[in-house]
Amino acid sequence: MKLHELTIHEALDLLQRREISATELTQAVLERIVAVDNDTKAYLTLTPEAACEEARTADELRAAGTDGALLGIPLALKDNICQIGLPTTCGSRILESFVPPYDATVVTRLRDAGVVFLGKTNLDEFAMGSSTENSAFFTTRNPWDLTRVPGGSSGGSAAALSANETLGALGSDTGGSVRQPASLCGVVGLKPTYGRVSRYGLVAFASSLDQIGPMGKDVTDCALLLSVIAGHDPRDSTSLDTPVPDYTQALRPELEGLRVGVPREYFGAGTQPGVEMALRKAIQVLADLGAKIGETSLPHTEYALPVYYLLAPAEASANLARYDGVKYGYSAPDAPDVWEAYRRTRQHGFGAEVKRRIMLGTYALSAGYYDAYYLKAQKVRTLIKQDFYRAFQEFDVVVGPTAPTVAFKIGEKAQDPLQMYLSDVFTIPQNLAGICALSLPCGFADGLPVGLQISGPVLGEELVLRVAYAYEQATEWHSQKPIIKKER
């Protein structure tokens, strides 16, 4: 196996046994990026010189007897996570020149663990999208088929992992933005419980929904990453003050007696037949591993999409009001007065999807419509949360498809926002409820990866990881990698 093909835990084992060095590992990954990133377009910013220096430091620390949980491991960050001294664009022209003067809490924790930072990955602008076509700079391509999207909004991180351009990555998940691209690219992505991972230094989209999550080539890597980045942070008022376990201790290859619920609402119209077939087979594997399978119901699932597209844009319209061309970021030149400067800055700095969501959110919050739309959506959000609470009284986890289809063609849904929004129909409810969920590969449909989504209760990451690991060990889907076929 080539060095860039290693998982994090495989690389750590070799590093600890001194069979490879962090410098060799980092150089191999950088060479892989040079070889394929012109095709996948996963990265917005690369930092090869800094990465090589960090790798040399890691080798020196290990030689001196110092160790770290991820010492010498090359990692990529989604470009809405602040890293000191490095552009953080959020895939937007309005922040094209923004360089944060501080690290996000997750970056600090990764740095303390000895990570080597490769650069920042592409995303839908301000994390608003399901295909990474909304980036202001370019569209990332799916390594399984370069004519198809990698999913979004963490499409750059998912594509980089799938193409072996990094050993691990971080994304952010507001309505499925870690899990859906993980599904479409055939990797593993975990959305932690809301508050489990600090949001300090994550550029806000919808503050009651956003959560940073790990992405890996397998379940063990996600557990390793989560163990490092999780934990209370006094700089984030929504951060949960609860102990962080070693999530790798939850990884066991059997499920004897575990109760797995299958929501009837997660199968039916809109789900691609090949996706449903792969999911049915995956559920049978769980049963063969000893899990007790039963049908459950999440009756308010059909309302999750409209609720999300009232609440998330409302929060976005408030969060994005700060981009006025005065404090930082793009500022429109030659405006005759301050109001025209604001208007031109936002006109030219924001893309079409961001503008659409700002207008939706502003409308929902406006006088005369607040009670009819925003307040009512909050009440239905509570009903969705109660659906999951009741399901978890009977079952340990619930499972279903991550996305209703496999990766679609670039441009196929670009002119139809509703069809694009439906790509997240199975991932949005978990964000509204604040629970944890994970996507991992469970088969193929039309030659493209299908994701199995495992959802757990609040702070149920150990349960979710246990189920995912047992399934992964019983199957070979996670070990299958794309052959990148360059376009002629």
Image (cartoon, rainbow, N blue to C red):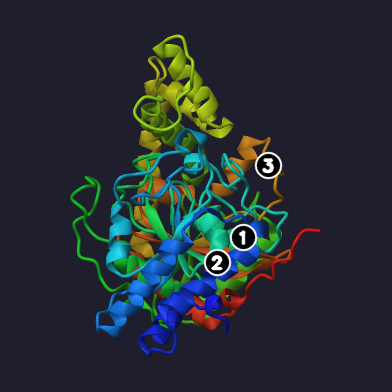
The disc placed on residue 37 is: 1
Residue at x 40%, y 50% (from the top left corner): 86
**In which quadrant of the rendered view does residue 74 lie?**
bottom left
Amino acid type, label 1: Asp
Instruction: In the rendered view, tell whether residue 204 sits above or below residue 439.
Output: above
Q: Quadrant of the N terminus?
A: bottom right
Instruction: In the rendered view, tell whether residue 10 sits above or below residue 302.
Output: below
First in sequence: mark 1 or mark 2?
Answer: 1
The disc placed on residue 165 is: 2
First in sequence: mark 1 or mark 3?
Answer: 1
Q: Secondary structure at mark 3?
A: loop
Amino acid type, label 3: Lys
Instruction: In the rendered view, tell whether residue 321 sits above or below residue 276.
Output: above
Between residue 374 and residue 203, name the one nearer to us.
Answer: 203
Amino acid type, label 2: Glu
The disc placed on residue 109 is: none
Task: Return the residue at label 3.
Answer: 413
Q: Secondary structure at mark 1?
A: helix
**In which quadrant of the rendered view does residue 137 lie?**
top right
Measuring from the top left, give residue 125's x and y in whole percent.
Answer: 51, 40
Between residue 472 and residue 95, name the one nearer to us.
Answer: 95
* Mark 2 crowdedness (10 Å alpha carbons): few <14, some 14-19, many ≥20: many
As measured in the structure, the alpha-carbon distance from the residue carrying label 1 to the one carrying label 3 is: 24 Å
First in sequence: mark 3 or mark 2?
Answer: 2
